[in-house]
Every structure is written in C-alpha cells, then in structure tokens.
Image (cartoon, rainbow, N blue to C red):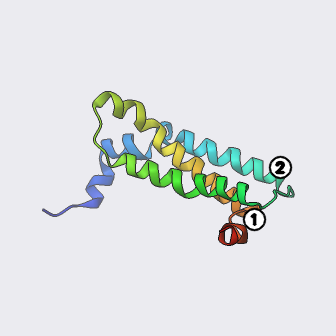
Amino acid sequence: MDLDAVQIFKTDEFYVMYASLYVNFASYAIGVIFGSFYYEYKNLKIESNVRNNIIWACFSFILPAFLIYMCTLQYSVLWAAIIGPFAKPTISLCLAIGILGMTFGLGGKHVLTAA
C-alpha cells in the first residue's frame, strides 16, 4: 500500500488534529512565555550544582521519554480524551525548560563528575 503524503496533509482531519491554532495554542503560549522569561532574566545566574542539573535533566530527558512511551499505549476513549490534550504542551514545556537550562549553563560538568 502506497502512502501519498500530499493527500494526507490536505485532509481536514490532519488540519484539525495537527495544524490548527487551537490544537497548538498551548505550545505556542509556552514558547512565548519562556522566550519572554529568557529576555527578561537572561543575565540571571543559576548555580550549576548537582541538584539543579538533576532537576533539569529530569525535565529535559526523563519526562519527555516517559510521555513518548505513554503515547504508545492503548487507552479507552475517555482516557485518550483526558490525556491527549496534555501530551503536546507538556513536551513543549520540557523542551522549553531544557533550552532555558542550557542557556543558563545547566547540564554541564557537574552531571558527569557527580558519581
């Protein structure tokens, strides 16, 4: 069976589920909030210690991996309707925290030399 990607992207279902503003609004809002936070506090110094690096790593790697795993599971219609809208904004939040942490110097040498 051949898949025609152009036809998939043109369907109303694709637009409603993946490309519409109301589906992506929370992710856009998280990006704007973290962008404005960075612009306001870009000279802030966050101590790069083991605790801060572990918290940053949990939000940057462990939580997104757990969410991706959760998206592979089968849910009832009710649970899918409850969990589904939170997955994409939560991944966006994790990415924003990860990028913000990198700009403040988290995740560096202390994570590697802590053991």
Q: Which quarter of the rendering shows the C terminus?
A: bottom right
Q: Position of residue 39 (x, y in %)?
A: 80, 53
* Viewer-nearest residue: 66 or 88: 66
Q: Which residue is mark 2?
A: 40
Q: Which residue is mark 1?
A: 105
In the picture, measured across the screen, residue 88 lies left or right of residue 29, that is: left
Q: Amino acid at mark 1?
A: Gly
Above or below for 71 versus 86: below
**Foreground: disc 2 or disc 1:** 1
Residue at image coords 49%, 36%: 22
- Helix, strand or loop for disc 2: helix
Above or below for 109 versus 64: below
Q: Position of residue 111 (x, y in %)?
A: 67, 66
Residue at image coords 39%, 51%: 69
Q: Amino acid at mark 2?
A: Glu
Residue at image coords 32%, 27%: 78
- Helix, strand or loop for disc 1: loop
Circle 1 residues within 10 Å: few <14, some 14–19, many ≥20: some
User: Tag on residue 31?
Assistant: none
Q: Point out the tag, 2 or 1, that comes first from the N-terminus.
A: 2
Q: Position of residue 6 (x, y in %)?
A: 29, 59
